[in-house]
Amino acid sequence: MDTLLTADMAAASPRFRRKSSTFEDAIHDMPEKMEMAPAQLYSTESGRLFHSGRIAIATVGLPARGKTHISVALARYLRWLGVKTRIFHLGDYRRATVGPGKDVPEDYFFVNASASTVLLRQKILKKCREDIYHFLNHENGQIAIYDAVNPLSAGRKSLAKEFAKHDIETLFIESSCDDERIIEENVRSVKISSPDYQGWDLDEAVKHYLARMSAKIPHFETMEESDLNYIKMINAGERLVINNCSFGYLSHRIVFYLLNLHIKSRHTYFARAGTSPENDTYKADAGLSSQGEEYAKKMCSTLLKHRAEEQATLLVQGGPETPLKPLTVWTSTRRRTVETAQYLAQKGFGVRQRSQMSQLNPGVCDKMSERRIRLEFPEEIEKHDLDPYHHRYPRAESYHDLAVRLEPIILELEREENDLLIVAHESVLRVLYGYNNEAKRISIPGLPEDIIPASPEDIKIPVPPSGVVSPMPGGLGSPKSGSATPERGPSSLKVSHDVEELRSRIHDV
């Protein structure tokens, strides 16, 4: 059983809905502020963890070394932990100060800049730091991520002293990279999609960006300050150097997370398992029905075709002629997910079974209709209405229990360098959406109308339409009609991606 309660559909909302595309689990209920994840592991009324102070994380590194990728990934993880976190991209402040469609002075990215350019830089820095202080001092923020180059040792020491005056601990994270393949991949991504280079000739954009990088190399000083807290990631996580002067709980959690992170690009795909026979129950663990077999075949062919088309599109846009990344497949240990992935296994793709990815245990509500649940467990219904994310039905798991169970999977997901397909039950995918919080759909054509199992009786939950990225910033929105597990129309794969945000920011200096 995927879902247990029906909710009113606020289809008339101008943003479709503030709440989630699943309502009854509360995993995607979007908070008023985007500094918090919709379904975090821990939570406090203030948004701060009581045993940790305020921290400013300052990135360090030359352009195209993955600083912004680290910032975005780390913020996602911290928000999921329940830590109120916001990223302050210095490049955003630069563009906002200069104005849309206007260029910065030609010497802006160079050390020996004119006096007027230096004043412009100081104006941009002042506004950025004022916003950091306001977030930490007046908005109950706990971690501010200052995404900039921060190239000089003297400047970093000055920054740490300034934050200390406000009782803010500073942690520097340097991304150091001398692997030309990684640097070229980042530069190509910038060349294709950076806001700074809209309308530019592709070759000219790369040439200009490399000049910006070269101008900073002679003046860049790597982190070696013994009196500062810092973490240095070398070559996309091949090695970590840690200088621990005064690490607290959150700093140690950050180190733990970064040990599992890399800055290489890849895609993660989510797919529902195929259908099982009508009499399937949680305990029975049935295999695929004939329709489920058909779905598995079409899902396999659609995914492989999509990957090939995506690579062809990248080449047309001027990307490098590199082979497709290997594809790894994860399933749970339950038969339905294993059998859904069998056709990919037959084509030679590696398939791993993960016991932590088993579906949410419905307890005594297994195979019950919503009507019967309401009749037999009215008190549980009231509790569920108050807190659907943490509530457990008798002998069942809550979605929070499932999220705790999936934490090792999330860390290994970050560690995975290949493209990844996760085939799992809807309840598991919902928790993973709650972590990634951004997805687009890939239609699987040619399926019978009823090939995907419907949600429990009389429950219809909106989801984003195929091929449309969510209109809700950072989250999953919904159209005015539809169902969480469509009863009619084509099924779809879902691909999680932070690519657009990374591409628009990875060039920031």
Image: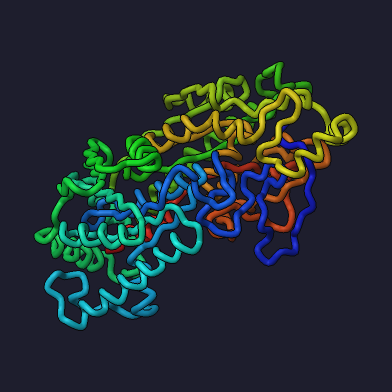
Whether residue 82 is situated above or below residue 428 in the rendered picture: below
The x, y position of residue 159, in whole percent, is 25, 61
Where residue 273 sits, quadrant-wise, is: top right
The x, y position of residue 214, in whole percent, is 14, 61
Whether residue 406 is situated above or below residue 228 in the rendered picture: above
For the point 49% across and 28% down, which residue is it?
330
In the orientation shown, which residue stands out farthest toward the bottom?
116
Q: Viewer-proximal residue, 307 or 284?
A: 284
In the orientation shown, which residue stands out farthest toward the top?
284
Q: Viewer-proximal residue, 100 or 241?
A: 241
Would residue 378 be seen by someone viewing this image from the given angle? yes
The x, y position of residue 94, in whole percent, is 33, 72
Would residue 320 be seen by someone viewing this image from the given angle? no
The N terminus sits in image quarter: top right
The C terminus sits in image quarter: bottom left
For the point 15% across and 47% down, which residue is it?
224
Residue 503 in the figure: left or right of residue 206 = right
The x, y position of residue 361, in whole percent, is 67, 25
Where residue 161 sits, quadrant-wise, is: bottom left
Residue 159 in the figure: left or right of residue 294 = left
Whether residue 245 is situated above or below residue 93 in the rendered picture: above
Whether residue 134 is situated above or below residue 360 in the rendered picture: below
Q: Viewer-proximal residue, 173 or 350?
A: 173
For the point 45% across and 46% down, which residue is it?
78
For the point 55% across and 28% down, which residue is it?
405
